Amino acid sequence: MSAIGKYPFVTIDNPAFDFENLLIGKTASQVFNLQNSSLVPTRYTIERVNDDGKDNAIQVDHTSGELQPGQIMKVTVTYTPSLAGVKSYCLFKVSAFGGNEIEFSCRGEADGYSVELSSKTVHFGEV
């Protein structure tokens, strides 16, 4: 008698996302492929590892789903900064039920508007 054990195994093609500097109010997106590399279907979840609930600048487009054997799902990560000078860092964990767990990180820095006057004084003349 012989047996073969099959368990879910998911992989991603990019373990780190760097959105660099982005002006507040703008949005940047990056996409990665989540693949079920096993021969059995699997359900998965994507959750924040270090979530204190204070910085929601980095988001994923969905947090759970199901993958058939060999199926690839595109997941979009977006960065929308709202406070100038804030450096955002977020670690996410992808868990396959009954299988493996993998992590990916995202970072970005919010830039504010830079405004300068061309003159130190304004002369309106005689009003």
Image (tube, rainbow, N blue to C red):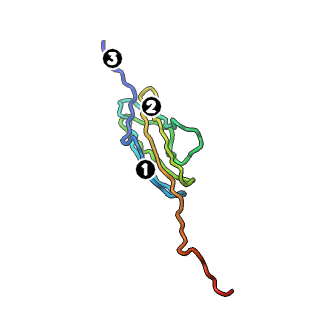
Q: Which residue is mark 1?
A: 30
* Residue 28 place in picture, x, y as percent: 47, 54
Label 2 neighbour load within 10 Å: few <14, some 14-19, many 20+: many
Disc 2, SS: strand
Q: Which labelled disc corresponds to residue 96?
A: 2
Residue occupying the point 48% across, 39% down: 91
Mark 1: amino acid: Gln
Looking at this rendering, what residue extends furthest in the left direction?
A: 1
Instruction: Tell me if label 2 and label 1 are in contact, CB under 8 Å.
Output: no
Q: CA distance from mark 3 to mark 2?
A: 22 Å
Residue located farthest toward the right when viewing the structure as drawn: 127
Is the C terminus in the top left, top right, bottom left or bottom right quadrant? bottom right
Provide the residue designation for mark 3: 3
- Mark closest to the chain's N terminus, 1 or 3: 3
Q: Nearer the viewer, mark 1 or mark 3?
A: 1
- Is label 3 in a helix, a strand or a loop? loop
Look at 37% across and 36% down and name the residue there: 11
**Percent position of residue 33, x then y:** 39, 43
Quarter-wise, where is residue 117 in the image? bottom right
Check disc 3 and give the amino acid type. Ala
Q: CA separation, marks 2 and 1?
A: 22 Å
Circles 3 and 2: CB atoms closer than 8 Å: no
Residue 14: x and y, percent? 37, 42
Q: Residue at x 45, y 44 (%)?
A: 106
Give how far apart the Cα atoms at labels 1 and 3 are: 41 Å
